[in-house]
Amino acid sequence: MKIGVLGAGQLGRMLALGGYPLNHQFGFSANTKDAPAASLGRVFLAKKKIDNIQALSNFADVITFESENTDAEMVAQISKNVAVYPSKKSLFITQHRGREKALFDKLNIPCAPYQMINSLQDLKAGIESIGLPAILKTATEGYDGKGQFLIKTTNQINQAWQNMNGVASILEKFVDFKRELSLIAVRSIDNDHKYYPLVENKHYEGILRLTIAPAQAVDAKMQKTAEHYMQILLDKMGHVGVLTLEMFETSEGLLINEMAPRVHNSGHWSIEGANTSQFENHVRAITGMPLGDTKLRQPYCAMINIIGEIGTTDKVLNMANAHLHLYAKAARKNRKLGHINITAQSKLELERSIKKLECFLPKSFF
Ligand code: AMP
């Protein structure tokens, strides 16, 4: 089939790399000719957005997107002529933290106490009821910790609100979590579900740096609980494709932080680490193919993000159990330029391999 992707970043690039072996073709709406995915399919330059989206729709048998910040109205328009998966419903909910949290509440999925904030008065009242510390986040468009302000004391309230530039925001109680986990799952057009194992994610300055798959010390109950939350969300939204749930493990159990209607950075390990990668499974789901097995190929796996500069990659290329993925992006501070997947037969081998690649990770991780 011909798959049209709204966006042409590294996620689109890896979707194409996952989909070509299944004999699919790809087209991308891109802002520039040298976008990460541009060399992997037809490029519809988004200068005259409407014309190019129309051209992409004419090209594609099915359309998907690589970001929740995709215009939901545009997706609704496109859906009149060509199937779009995930649908506008999933996109509309997941692109707004308030709508997302309201759905969690409705489905009894636990998350941190929160209040929607539209003014300084709201913020003061929110802090009164939620308490401090708390995090103020923009309701839309935030990623990698951008658009967030950690409020520790009441004399930071004015500064926090100024920081939001008057946009609709959400105030969340600061969660004293043990660690951050995520669950990736995929749902097919005919309602089959597959779940990857829970993975552990380590962030530095708001950016994901290391994923360990599977997360250690996860019992069957915790995996089942996370899968239960995932299943009701997938079904409620009628989601088709990959859905990611980011969560906190606390002493009282799991609290869901947010969800993403797409393949996710914390699932990149699955390219070499799982029997079917998240990218191939997303492509399978949106093209009506049977979903692939999500088990690990080896007992242990890790993913290290390459951030800001690529550095010396020979070390990676010389390791039998390491796999380098570069995204064809120019180096820039805090930019995701690629990642390294490590596979291992034992925990010790995994730890030693991560240590060998410590130059790609923050010093504080060791
Ligand atoms: P988010 O954009 O919501 O994924 O937040 C980025 C990062 O900020 C998360 O991965 C957490 O490390 C941290 N964070 C977000 N919300 C909270 C919270 N309510 N309590 C504690 N830490 C948080």
Image (cartoon, rainbow, N blue to C red):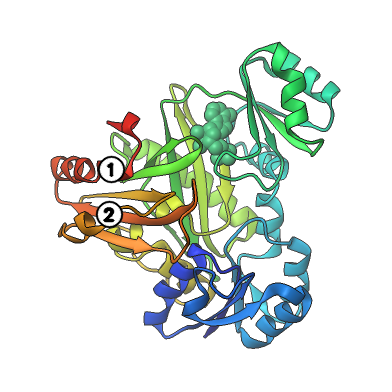
**Residue, disc 2:** 312
**Residue, disc 1:** 359
Closer to the camera in the image, 158 or 278? 158
Closer to the camera in the image, 167 or 80? 167
Quick check: marks 2 and 1 in contact, CB under 8 Å?
A: yes
Per the image, label 2 sits on a secondary structure element best described as loop
Mark 2 vs 1, N-terminal side: 2
Mark 2 close to ligand 1, CB under 8 Å: no
Q: Amino acid at mark 2?
A: Thr
Identify which residue is drawn at 36% across, 45% down: 211
Q: Is residue 63 left or right of residue 25?
A: right
Per the image, label 1 sits on a secondary structure element best described as helix
Q: Is residue 31 above or below residue 24?
A: above
Q: Quadrant of the C terminus?
A: top left
Image location (x, y in percent) of residue 10? 48, 63
Crowding near the residue tagged with mark 2, few <14, some 14–19, many ≥20 C-alpha atoms within 10 Å: few
